[in-house]
Structure formats: C-alpha cells, structure tokens
Amino acid sequence: EAGVAQSPRYKIIEKRQSVAFWCNPISGHATLYWYQQILGQGPKLLIQFQNNGVVDDSQLPKDRFSAERLKGVDSTLKIQPAKLEDSAVYLCASSWGGYEQFFGPGTRLTVL
Amino acid sequence: AQKITQTQPGMFVQEKEAVTLDCTYDTSDQSYGLFWYKQPSSGEMIFLIYQGSYDEQNATEGRYSLNFQKARKSANLVISASQLGDSAMYFCAMREGRDRDDKIIFGKGTRLHILP
C-alpha cells in the first residue's frame, strides 16, 4: 500500500513570495490533515478535511494561508505572502476513521 | 495550560537498557485517546502505540508499552531493550472526544539518544 505522498520535499523562498505544497493521501482515506512543525516543537494542526469539507481550520492563519481538497482526494496548502516565521516542516496526514493517522515525509520550507 | 507535557527535552540511554519517556496530559473529557509517535531524523512521523481512555489494560506493541495511569493523567512510553535505531524524537499526543477523526494535540517531544 502506497503511503502519503508530499511534494516538494524542500523549498526555499524569499519573504513575501508565495508557495504551494501538495499532498496525496492514502487511497480511500476520507480525512486529511495539514500540520505545521516548527523546529524544536511538536506538529500543530493547521486544517482538517473530511472528504471535501473543512472540519477544523481554527489554527490556520487565514490572512495568508489557504488550503483546498479537490474531489476529496489530493490537497494543496498555499502561503501567500510568506513570512520568516513560516519556516517549518509542513506535514500531511490521512486517516480512514480509525485512530491512527498516517503521515507523509513532509515539506521543509525555509523563508529567507 | 498545556494539554500535553513532556518534561524531558533529551535523554541518553545505553543500548539494551529499558527507557521510560514521560508524558502527562490535561483534559476534562471522559473519552480521549493517547498516542506516541516516533520521528527519526528523516522527518516522517511513525505511529508507535495507542491507548484509549476506557481501555483497562495498558497497550503494548512489541518492544513498546504504554504505562497508563489515569488518575495521575500520565501516559509514559516504555521501550524495552533499546536499540541504536531507537534514537529519534518521540512525541506524546492526545485526541479529545469520541470521534476518531478529531484533531490530535502533540507535546513538544523528547529527543532520545541510544549510546552503543
């Protein structure tokens, strides 16, 4: 069974530029999560999708971050414009309704 | 107040010894779940073990066991016979509520170093 796929693995941008991350969850997983993990901290949930709909986006900085999940499968997370404090690893995870979340390898973002 | 507290930022343990990683949690829900994840230097989060709040037995998965003390709100991870490959960051996490898709809140982690 293929795992959660994410791309790119690494991205370096200047502040005020925009960036997008892509996630392909495990086939059949209805729930998809985006986490932000700042160096030295645990992951923090940014947004959770159930199929196409948003379940929780309470910690998403909506003035600059946006996310969508088209057709209930792939998802993209966008940052526009990026700030220095957005430097982090962005993790995507998916689940099928069981208690376990399956994580992708993450995208490491550096904002200069 | 922090929901998940991991008081050990780093630990050094000799290979083959047992390791206990501490975790305390804070919730007023009766139904919740507790998780441990391992994050090696590659960055991927690897699920290790799960304990439901109503589970009477401590969870075990191979060399991993979860020492669940409900009254103390404690969910320590025990790794028996540690190996060099156990060197990684370890995160304790909690899901509040009955819905298995509810969000998980992570602690700040403990970095474990296994010494040869």
Image: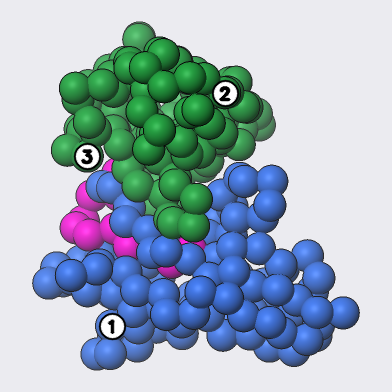
The residue tagged 1 is B73
Dot 3: element:
loop
- In which quarter of the view is residue B90 placed? bottom right
Question: Does the CB distance between marks 1 and 3 fall below 8 Å?
Answer: no
Residue B21: where, in percent of width, then height?
Answer: 53, 80
Q: Quadrant of the N terminus of chain A?
A: top right
**What's the CA distance linking mark 1 and mark 3?**
26 Å
Q: Colour of chain B?
A: blue
Amino acid type of the residue that numbered disc 2 sits on in the rendered structure: Ile
In the figure, A101 relative to A107: above or below?
A: below
Dot 2: element:
strand
**What's the CA distance linking mark 1 and mark 2?**
41 Å
Is B93 part of what is drawn in magenta?
yes
Residue A70: where, in percent of width, then height?
Answer: 35, 10
Residue drawn 28% across the image and 90% down it? B72
The residue tagged 2 is A12
Tags 2 and 3 both on a single chain: yes
**Left or right of residue B81: residue B30:** left
Q: Which residues are magenta?
A: B91-101
Residue drawn 75% across the image and 76% down it? B114
The residue tagged 3 is A59
**Label 2 Cα crowd, 10 Å radius (few <14 / some 14-19 / many 20+):** few
Q: State which mark lies toward you, 1 or 2.
A: 2
B76 or B109, which is in the foreground? B109
Tell me which numbered mark, 2 or 3, is placed earlier along the sequence.
Answer: 2
